[in-house]
Image (spheres, rainbow, N blue to C red):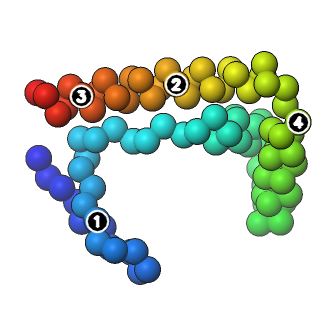
Amino acid sequence: MRIKKTNRPGYSLRLKNPLVPKRVPNPYAMYLQERLKLRPVLNSREEYLQSISIISKDWRELPDAEKQKYIDIYREKSEERAKLLEKKVSG
């Protein structure tokens, strides 16, 4: 097993273990990724920021029933990650 060292300016030195699965994005981040994929290519930073603000407004106005879809996916993926971590720790 090889552990990589990462050192970015302004951050303390931390070790990354390549065997540990990535963190699961939260429900809002999943919604954001999904919506950004549907948008045309954004040419400038301003277009990107404008899109993000529109999508975040849509998220706030989204009914709880529709948000639940993303919450359920988040919980599912979190449980899968926890099982993977448990397997890697125990064996």
Label 1: state its secondary structure: strand
Label 3: state its secondary structure: helix
From what the image shows, is residue 76 above or below residue 46?
A: above
Which residue carries the number 4 mark? 61
Crowd around label 3: few <14 · some 14–19 · many ≥20 (10 Å): few
What is the CA distance from the residue labelled 3 to the residue labelled 2? 16 Å
Q: Are marks 3 and 1 in contact (CB under 8 Å)?
A: no
Question: Can the viewer see residue 30 in this picture?
Answer: no
Which residue appears farthest toward the bottom when viewing the image?
9
Which residue carries the number 2 mark? 75
What is the CA distance from the residue labelled 1 to the residue labelled 2? 27 Å
Which residue carries the number 1 mark? 14
From what the image shows, is residue 39 above or below residue 72?
A: below
Crowd around label 2: few <14 · some 14–19 · many ≥20 (10 Å): some
Q: Residue at x 45, y 29 (%)?
A: 78
Quarter of the rendering containing residue 23: top left
